Amino acid sequence: MDPIIEVKNLKKYYKQHKKEPGLKGSIKALFKRKYKTIKAVDDVSFTIDKGEMVGFIGPNGAGKTTTLKVLSGLLYPTAGEAKVLGYIPHKRQPEYQKQFSLVMGQKNQLWWDLPAIESFILNKEIYEVPNEQYKKTVAELSELLDVKDVLKVQVRKLSLGQRMKCELIAALLHSPKVLFLDEPTIGLDVVMQKKIREFFKEYNKKFETTVILTSHYMDDVKELCKRIIMINKGIVVYDGSLEKIIQKYAANKYIKMVFLKEVAKTDIAKFGKVVEHEPLKATISVERKETPHVASEVLRNLPVDDLDIAEPELDDIIRKLFENK
Ligand SMILES: Nc1ncnc2c1ncn2[C@@H]1O[C@H](COP(=O)(O)OP(=O)(O)OP(=O)(O)O)[C@@H](O)[C@H]1O
Ligand SMILES: [Mg+2]
């Protein structure tokens, strides 16, 4: 079976207008414009098979959104190839438009002043979704996402979570085979993030949708993706199992402490590597398997008011990975 998504040596450079500061710079710029090239995507290659849910991760500015925009046909690549479902995205063929969806957590496509259901109807027309399928999909998804009661409320009056769920329904109305999810849970509280995550899990299982997900939340990626593609400065630096990366680079956990009275850094350092220290607060990093033992030692020996054990954030793991490179 052919892969659903194929990207080969993809590049996307942005040209940014450069102006020297001050009036002199402005005048100079009138006659001779200078450009700076930003290599947002510099060398990205991967293939993704049907039904796979792949985490696309990397630090801010790594080129994730740019890659997804190229795959959605919003941007023309500078060089290299991208193919989705056999289509070349930037050709923007209507048949392709009907088979994928791009969801951006930072942007909304719903009409702000109208109830969500009106935007759904508009999408139904644009994507030529048959009546029966439309009714069935809206009923099913609004049930699954628990937003049946708010579909007729003006979008501007919805909570962020409710709005995101409606955004998802709008994006899924035409039953896309491929989904590009760009930080779909950004800004949502932990409970809502979890709900959306569970929805994606179920949706992917049911429809075998092929998904690329970007997220800065460790839990999103851990829950949904067996495979990750890691990108830094426009270049793929890892493509493989998430589990392996975690075992290798997240060998430590964090113990976060709040104290009843001031504790010196030297006293805290006896228990682990100090990563944060304030008079009444500190965080230490300890080996994963030592965590329970160290936590009980800390409780016994320091004036602890509150203690919390945390997993390192995905961003921390990524940083470590890049430091080691
Ligand atoms: N329209 C544009 N014009 C010029 N430069 C751009 C444009 N859009 C993005 N960039 C630059 O391209 C690089 C990659 O941006 P991109 O949005 O793809 O990163 P990202 O991996 O999605 O980051 P984040 O995690 O912050 O969302 C950045 O340096 C960014 O400043
Ligand atoms: Mg982005």
Image: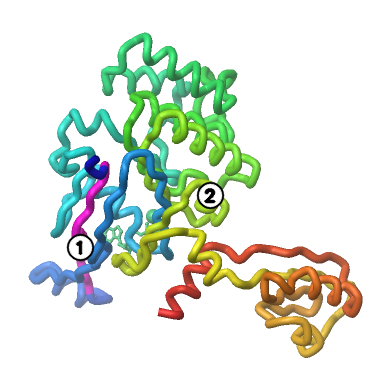
- Residue 11 drawn at (x, y percent): 20, 61
Write the start and end of the magenta stretch as one range: 4-19
Q: Which residue is mark 2?
A: 220
The reply to whether residue 284 is in sight is yes
* Residue sitting farthest toward the front: 1
Q: Quadrant of the C terminus?
A: bottom left
Find residue 13 and name its label: 1
Lateral position of residue 40 relative to residue 222, left or right: left
Asked whether mark 1 lies closer than 8 Å to ligand 1, one says: no
Q: Amino acid at mark 1?
A: Tyr
For disc 1, the neighbor class at 10 Å (few under 14, some 14 to 19, many from 20) is some
Q: Nearer the viewer, residue 93 or 201?
A: 201
Q: Nearer the viewer, residue 117 or 96?
A: 96
- Residue 63 drawn at (x, y percent): 32, 60
Q: Residue at x 56, y 21 (%)?
A: 143
SS for callout 2: helix
Q: Residue at x 83, y 82 (%)?
A: 263
Q: Nearer the viewer, mark 2 or mark 1?
A: 2
Of labels 2 and 1, earlier in sequence is 1
Q: Residue at x 28, y 48 (%)?
A: 69
SS for callout 1: strand
Q: Main secondary structure of the magenta part?
A: strand
- Residue 164 drawn at (x, y percent): 50, 36
Q: Amino acid at mark 2?
A: Asp
- Residue 217 drawn at (x, y percent): 54, 55
For disc 2, the neighbor class at 10 Å (few under 14, some 14 to 19, many from 20) is many
The reply to whether residue 160 is in sight is no
Marker count (numbered): 2
Colour logic = rainbow
